Amino acid sequence: MTDQDQVGVNPIVLQRADPHVLRHGGQYYFTGSHPDYDRIVLRRAARLEDLQAADEVTIWTRHADGPQSQLIWAPEIHRVDGSWYVYYAAAPVAHGTVDAPSENETFNHRVFVLENTADDPFAGEWVERGQLDTGWESFALDATTFTLGGEQYLVWAQQDLAVRGHSNLYIARMEKPWMLATPAVELTRPEHDWETRGFWVNEGPSVLVRDGRVFLTYSGAATGIDYAMGLLTADADADLLDPASWTKSPTPVFVSDPSVGQYGPGHNSFTTTPEGDTVLVYHARTYTEIVGDPLRDPNRHARAQILPFDADGNPVWGTPVPDTRPTPTSTEVLPPSGEF
């Protein structure tokens, strides 16, 4: 990557993993996993590089008990038919209490949906639409949505106990933003060496529709240095609910780059510049040695860079760009304001 591939200052937001950016009405709306995993936050700015300094508003907090009481993960904000929706994953407390879960806590996430019908998502009321029924009960997370040909689709990660691994990717057409219209169809499961390092994982899907094709990115492996992004591709006029419509790359398309100090890039989203260029948004760390539980390490930072395309319309993924903003070390904690 060259300097012109930078989008302002990187990281765009510190200590926010699983970043999701939506450009709407000349503003960038940003959300991501809060390192305390207890809330859903939202901020906005006219420029990506201004998101770090933007006020962050908590639009929802975990429940005191029940299925939405811990490990609030990977929220995404979407605009569908004039309303705002946030898709996120949450889990119940398996042992201990909300404030002090035991070390034996289990990950038993499900997908949930919030709705806000106001023009301004900071002013309106966020209403819980509850759990999104994917067709069966098991570990489920990382839901994303897109609209194509007048139809809304959901893509998400979920565990099938009959399949080796932690999560596969599924797709379904939607009846409404919080309800599926069709059964889930498996698109990919962990099968290649790069997807099964540490954990057998396909997760964090994101969809880009461009020039008659659908690019579906996802992340695989454990969330350290091996974490990387994979790719499925389909024609935009194909039956997206037919697995045969999709072609899977056997190798990852975006990986760690020690030469620029970026490790574990993944769980991406897509947005655009004001001029219409595609922007790849993702998180990564700047070190490989994690002190303590990797889940509690806060320093996966949100980053963004221009995603160019070749003459045939294929993404030129390149490699993560270097940081141009100071970042905390593995032992540093940001002040409450988030300024650094």
Image: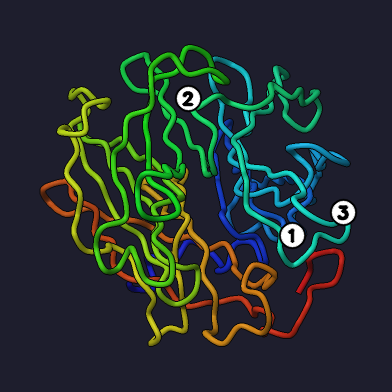
Disc 1 is placed on an element classified as: loop
Marks 3 and 2 sit apart, C-alpha to C-alpha, by 29 Å
Marks 2 and 1 sit apart, C-alpha to C-alpha, by 41 Å
Disc 3 is placed on an element classified as: loop
Q: Can you say whether 321 is above or below 174 in the image? A: below
Q: Can you say whether 155 is above or below 292 in the image? A: above
The quarter of the displayed image where residue 87 is located: top right
Foreground disc of the pair 2, 1: 2
Q: Which residue is mark 3?
A: 97
Question: CB atoms at circles 3 and 2 under 8 Å apart?
Answer: no
Percent coordinates x, y for residue 305 in the rendering: 43, 61
Q: Which residue is mark 2?
A: 135
Q: Earlier in the sequence, mark 1 or mark 3?
A: 1
On-image quarter of the N terminus: bottom left
The quarter of the displayed image where residue 27 is located: top right
Give me the residue at 79% from left, 65% from top: 338
On-image quarter of the C terminus: bottom right
Disc marking residue 109: none
Give me the residue at 73% from left, 85% from top: 331
In the image, is 74 to the left or to the right of 249? right
Q: Which residue is mark 1?
A: 53
Disc 2 is placed on an element classified as: loop
